Amino acid sequence: MSSPSYLKRHNLRPTEAGLTATDTSQPGWTRRRRGKGWSFCSTTGSTLSGANRERCASLAIPPAWQSVWINPDPRGHIQAYGEDAEGRRQYIYHPDWREAADAAKFADLPHFADRLPRMRTRIRRILTSSEDEHVLALATVVGLMDTAGLRIGSRRHQARTGAVGAVTLCRKHLRFEDDAVTLHFRGKSGKDQRITIDAPELCGAIGRLADSAEASRIFDGEGRMVREGEVNDFIHDIAGLDFSAKDFRTWGGSAAAAGYLRRAEEPTISDASEAAANWLGNTPAIARKSYIHPAVIEQARTGERWTKTAGPSRLRVDERATYALIASC
């Protein structure tokens, strides 16, 4: 497949989904606590009622969000935003925009697969030879996402929920046996995760970081602190296109589901979603909604085993099955 100079997601315009582009610097509607619920106010401060109030309520803005802004335009591609408990700005998008954005994300996935062998080569080279501790830490985090399906994670999220991701792994979460490392930790939504890694270069890097860690977390300390934005910048650098951690999880979830389709005599959507969820550490419903390419779902719907492969020869066999499925749609 020819390599693009840009990704479809970055060329997507709200007008393509029949929406208007939202300018969040413009005044918006707000909400106020009223008893056990909420009232919503216009840009002039008057209380909204009728259809306008119903639309605001239907957005299901999380109660914990602060500094909430609501778009007066029901066709705006951004419908609302607010700050979550960790101080991050979160958005609620129009359903038509989410659908268009998901389609663009999945359309970009074959290009991610085309770049994946070269990304893995770069990562292995760094894991075995880099003397820059920060670059080594970044490569290890991406290696964990690629090899074990881990989320990036965040220190603030762990402090609030106890959920562990790649950057918040501690020595107590690691068990070294022979030539493998077993990770055992509590993931998002309290899900217990136990993952064994046997990739030699990645195991070696994890061991070196754990041995030299100044604190219990293996990615804490001067020179090795890793943040989400840095991880995505690193992925962009090694891929040559603006991919992110989300692409690793989308590809991994799709490949796990496609791998199930390769092995099952009478595959089902439910079991394909379960296979992806086990890889991603989340629920089958979320895996199906956000991480499995529609072509994989459609193949599972047929109830027939998938045997074809395609794509770069250095991809894993389940990944080549995924590539062939995507190419067939």
Image (cartoon, helix red, strand yellow):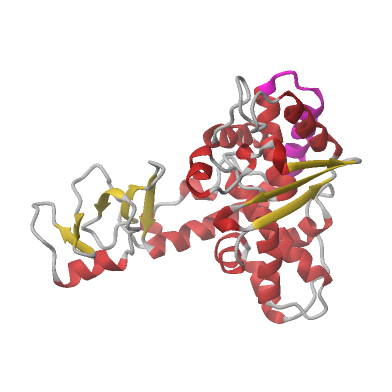
Judge whether residue 203 is colored magenta: no
- Relative to the observer, which residue lies in front, 292 or 165? 165
- Relative to the observer, which residue lies in front, 152 or 107? 152
- Relative to the observer, which residue lies in front, 329 or 278? 278
Quarter of the view holding residue 228: top right
- Looking at the image, is 264 positioned above or below residue 15? below
| Left or right, residue 202 beside residue 43 | right
Indicate the position of residue 322 as horizontal and vertical percent values: 73, 61
Q: Residue at x 35, y 58 (%)?
A: 62
Indicate the position of residue 146 as horizontal and vertical percent values: 71, 46
Spot the residue most to the right: 178
Total residue callouts? 0
In the image, which residues are magenta? 116-133
- Looking at the image, is 171 positioned above or below residue 310? above
- Looking at the image, is 174 positioned above or below residue 285? above
Label the magenta part by its dominant secondary structure: helix
Q: Residue at x 84, y 49 (%)?
A: 313
| Left or right, residue 311 beside residue 229 | right
Judge whether residue 119 is colored magenta: yes
The answer, for residue 326, to whether it is visible in the render is no
